[in-house]
Image (cartoon, grey):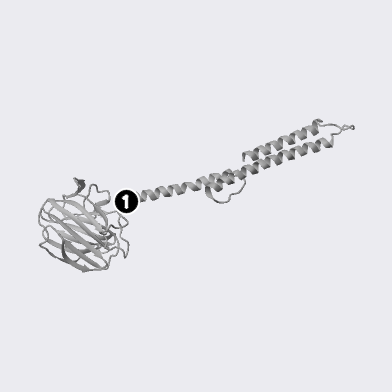
Amino acid sequence: MIVQKRLLGITILLSFVLLGLVSCGGGTESEDGELDAGDIINTLTAMDATQIALEEQLAEMGFQRDSQGDAQSGTDQDSSVDSGGDTQAEVDQEPAEETSAETQSESEQESSVDSQPDADGVIYRTDFEDADDWNTFVRSGNDNFEASTRQGYYYIQIDGRYLRVFSILEDLYMQRDAADVRIEIATESIAGPNRNNISLICRYTELGWYEFNMGSDGLWSIQIYDSASDSYETLYNGGSDYINLKLLSNEFAAECIGDELSFYINGQFIFSVRDSQFREGQIGFVVSTFNIAGVGVEVDWLEVSVP
């Protein structure tokens, strides 16, 4: 573009010179007082030669720009000099960099959940040095509870009655028809009366979920929650001597494989039922109180695996 402007300027300048020769008699006059035609022809010839030389220089510069472009992109480019094209190329490169940054950010957010299971099928495990992966909330009622990590435990304290505190793993969603999962947890009740539930959840969505409940009184149940009716249905329940009562630790597991829902407590198989209403969703756990307020539960670790 700069060379084109220079070419135009020089052409205009030479035109003024020619006009000056014509108007001022700057050229060689013939014997009858008129401007010599030979001088005019020489002047025009010089202008043409100058223009040709500048056009050749312009073409040469255009060829050099193409060579650089080919070296960078490996594609053919127009030999004309186009600053707008250079600007567009820079703009085209910027979204690619932003997309790369977004992809990296998403990868960092999901790094806590392994996309590929290990040799034992484990895709997630936490010892609760922090709870950044977890969304903890009360679905209904007041928020009279505390949730925090301390000394490698996730501590949940509930000071109200009839409260259910949910903790849902945010970065793991088991897709439809690929939601076969085993969830294991280690917990200990350290405060409050002997009247609370600790539960595991699979296939959690806003439509509903499956819940495996272990009570501090030795009772257990497998339930389904349907948000359409806003109610729980007990698929099966009972009592077990394998549950450590009062302020003691327990390890228990829930398996949701196909339409089969299986419950294990302290390494022992408890019961299995079948239901096919929910086929996808997240996993999590729940701490609940009933008619007596107050409970303090420490969650030591939680592990998620696939069959």
Give whichever of 301, 191 is nearer the camera.
Answer: 301
Around disc 1, counting alpha carbons within 10 Å, would you say few (fewer than 14), some (14 to 19), or many (20 or more)? few
Query: Horizontally, is 73 left or right of 271 in the view?
Result: right
Secondary structure under the numbered disc 1 in the rendered image: loop
Residue 167 location, x and y as percent? Answer: 24, 53
Q: Residue furthest right?
A: 32
At x 68% / y 36%, what residue is drawn? 9
Quick check: 261 above or below 91? below
**For residue 224, which quarter of the picture?**
bottom left
Give the position of the C terminus as an image quadrant: bottom left
**For residue 277, which quarter of the picture?**
bottom left
**For residue 265, which quarter of the picture?**
bottom left
Quick check: 88 above or below 22? below
Disc 1 marks a residue whose amino acid type is Ser
Query: Horizontally, is 200 left or right of 178 in the view?
Result: left
Give whichever of 264, 118 is nearer the camera.
Answer: 118
At x 20% / y 65%, what residue is drawn? 262
Q: Which residue is mark 1?
A: 111
Residue 222 location, x and y as percent? Answer: 19, 64
Quick check: 124 above or below 2? below
Query: Horizontally, is 174 left or right of 86 in the view?
Result: left
Count the marks: how many? Answer: 1
At x 14% / y 56%, what residue is drawn? 250
Residue 191 location, x and y as percent? Answer: 12, 50
Residue 299 location, x and y as percent? Answer: 18, 52
Give whichever of 54, 37 is nearer the camera.
Answer: 54
Give the position of the N terminus as an image quadrant: top right
At x 84% / y 35%, what residue is drawn? 36
